[in-house]
Image: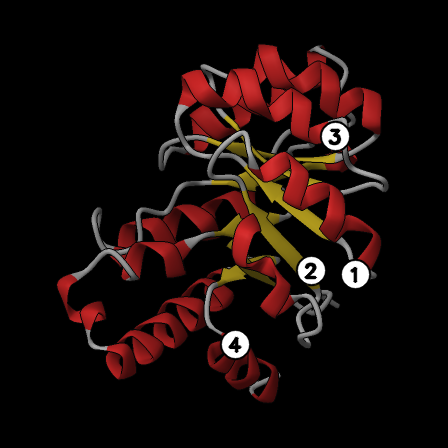
Amino acid sequence: MKDKVKYILEAPIKSAEKIIETDCDIIGLKIEEEADKEVLKRLLPRIKKPVMLRCTGDDTTDKELMPEFIELLDKESIIAYVNENTYKSILPFVIKGGHKLVIRTPIDINLAKEMNILCSDEGQSLDKIIIDTDIGGLGYGFEYGYSIMEKIKLEGENDKYLNMPLISFAAEETAKTKEARDEKLAVFLEISSASGVKAAGADYIVLTKQEVLQTMKELE
């Protein structure tokens, strides 16, 4: 029987104070700049739940900052994410800390497998890898992203390099649409995207709104 989906409620580190007491499974902390290190130091002793630490999304910045932030963590956490450009710089610190690693690749099952093999060869345990297919929510077409997630789940039954949990940041993609400028509609868009990737087999779903978290929990 499939384990329950784990919901990650994410916020920039500077504003994460408002989410650390919520009913999420994992607290997501997004790095924006180097100064966030001091805020992270103050927050970590107060966070009793598991943590996901997410990079800025700029490869050059992340290769410099992520190792410094990872070394501040006081417990096993999820590090999100590395890609083909950043994994060699970040992975040694992930392995040293015994953390789980999110590996992001474009929407392609072969690229996902290739990156999993590369990180495994560098020393990351397969049971500490989480696949991010970078669903690109609405940009690529939700159906395509959905089908790739399903395919990875099916192939993973017989392939140890694909037999890992899936994580989805689809809610972040819906927030980029012009419709999401309407706050009420943004909530419904996030619920829709989260429900879709849950049906596709996501094991971790990253949310940005507390009301969406409450709704998804009620649908369990």
Mark in the foreground, 3 or 4? 4
Q: What residue type is labelled 3?
A: Leu
Q: Do the residues labelled 3 and 4 touch (CB within 8 Å)?
A: no
Give the labeled residue for mark 4. Answer: 210
On the rendered image, what quadrant is the C terminus found in? Answer: bottom right
Q: Mark 1 points at which residue?
A: 49
Disc on the earlier residue, 1 or 3? 1
- Can you tell which mark lies on residue 166? none
Estimate the spatial distance between the alpha carbons at disc 1 and disc 3, rounded to whole Å. 23 Å
**Amino acid type of the residue that numbered disc 1 sits on in the rendered structure:** Lys
Quadrant of the drawing holding the N terminus = bottom right
Q: Residues within 10 Å of mark 1 (few under 14, many from 20)?
A: some
- Residue matched to label 2: 26
Where residue 35 appears, as percent x and y from the top left, is 55, 34
Along the horizontal axis of the image, is 100 left or right of 132?
A: right
Counting residues from the start of the chain, the first of labels 2 and 3 encountered is: 2
Question: Spatial distance from mark 2 to mark 3, Cα to Cα?
Answer: 21 Å
Q: Is 42 situated above or below 74? A: below
Q: Report the side of 85 relative to 218 (left or right).
A: left
Closer to viewer: mark 2 or mark 3: 2
Mark 4 crowdedness (10 Å alpha carbons): few <14, some 14-19, many ≥20:
some
Residue 170 screen position, x and y as percent: 39, 56
Say what secondary structure mark 2 lies in: strand
> How many neighbours does mark 3 have within 10 angstroms: few (below 14), some (14-19), or many (20 or more)?
some
Whether residue 158 appears in this view of the structure is no
Chain-order first, disc 3 or disc 4? 3
Residue at numbered disc 3 = 126
